[in-house]
Image (tube, rainbow, N blue to C red):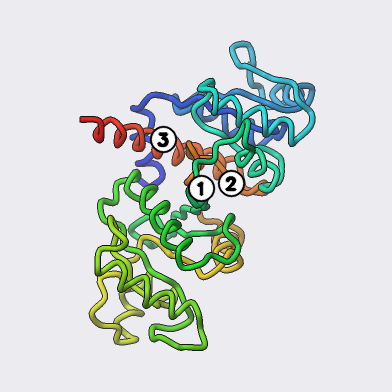
Amino acid sequence: MKMFDKLLEQVRGESPQRIAVAAAHDKRVLEAVFNAKERGVGIPILVGKEDKIRQYTDELGIDLQDTTVIDEPNHMQAALYASNMVRQGEADLLMKGILHTAEIMRAVLNREKGLRQGNVISHTAILEIEGLDRLLFVTDAGMVIDPSLDQKIEIILNASIIAKALGIEMPKVAVLSALEIVNPNMPSSLDGSTLTQMNRRGQIEGCIVDGPLALDTAVSVERASHKDVKGSEVAGVADILLVPNIETGNAIYKAATTFANFRSAGVILGAKVPIILPSRADTAESKFLSIVVASRVATYLAEQREKNKR
């Protein structure tokens, strides 16, 4: 059984999340959310162009009888409406439909109807790579354009929460660069060294950080050995790839899904709730898997809050 399939089996045993979908008038989005409903993972609340929603659900053979549909044709207003539903406790998760990431993020950051809580909001792509014995987390692939060192710390922590929710007790984080040694002319290598030292001194907790590491060294034991990388707990076995900038992360994510057709999910963390944020061009399966991951993360965070109360 593949790793996403195992995760689905776990999530199906948990309470389904109410999902407010902003600009839900898209066939792939509707296919994904009703797949989630059928499997007991989510309860869709559809905000968008009602005529298009009904047209597409008719074409897909989906019954809308017990589903809430809010007619809001304007993308920005749909995003604000869906975000406010989560803010008011009328929904548990927010999902991006057929609108730009910038539009849904403007709603998330809105003072009156948004979900911001002061943390760095970052995107993590989760990839199921053929031949790899684990899920691979790539961050930030869609939110923070050129993260500072402080932002990279929070991006690591956000991705680590997602990894822990998916069963990795101590995630191994590779700080990516083009090589395994520090080069003063390569800022990503300097950040890799600094983040590694901060982790070793207890300034970044709950994960193991090492860098700089090239991508192949981070994920392949054979290549790490061939390059004679020693003394690293992360080389060859990384769970999380911390990329230098959004271009790098986005390219890895899109290359994996476009050229290799690997299964993927996309989730944003750092707001009041996980945000389901696949690419608009992603398959219905990828959008569904994003729902599965976000649902597991939401349940995990609720479990942690309960644990902290005791």
Real-space Cα separation, disc 3 to disc 1, in angstroms: 15 Å
Quarter of the C terminus within the rendering: top left
Q: Which numbered mark, 3 or 1, is in the foreground of this view? A: 3
Query: Which residue does the numbered mark 3 point to in the structure image?
Result: 298
**Image quarter of residue 78:** top right
Q: Gap in Å between the C-alphas at discs 2 and 1? A: 6 Å
User: Label 2: few (<14), some or many (≥20) within 10 Å?
Assistant: many
Q: How many marks?
A: 3
Q: Nearer the viewer, residue 92 or 191?
A: 191
The first of marks 2 and 1 along the sequence is 1
Coordinates of residue 190 in the picture (x, y in percent): 43, 80
Instruction: Estimate the spatial distance between the alpha carbons at disc 2 and disc 3, rounded to whole Å.
Output: 17 Å
Q: Nearer the viewer, residue 171 or 111?
A: 111
Sooner in the amino-acid sequence: mark 3 or mark 1: 1
Instruction: Please state the horizontal and vertical placement of residue 301, each as a whole percent of the image.
Output: 36, 37
Q: Is residue 222 above or below residue 152?
A: below
SS class, disc 2: loop
The amino acid type of the residue labelled 3 equals: Ala
Q: Which residue is mark 2?
A: 278
Give the x, y percent position of residue 299: 37, 33
Q: Residue at x 33, y 72 (%)?
A: 196
| Residue at image mark 1 | 265
Q: Position of residue 203 (x, y in %)?
A: 30, 63
Residue type, label 1: Ala
Label disc, if present, on residue 126 of the rendered structure:
none
| Location of residue 82 with respect to 63 vertically, above or below | below
Q: Which element type, helix, strand or loop, lies under badge 3?
A: helix
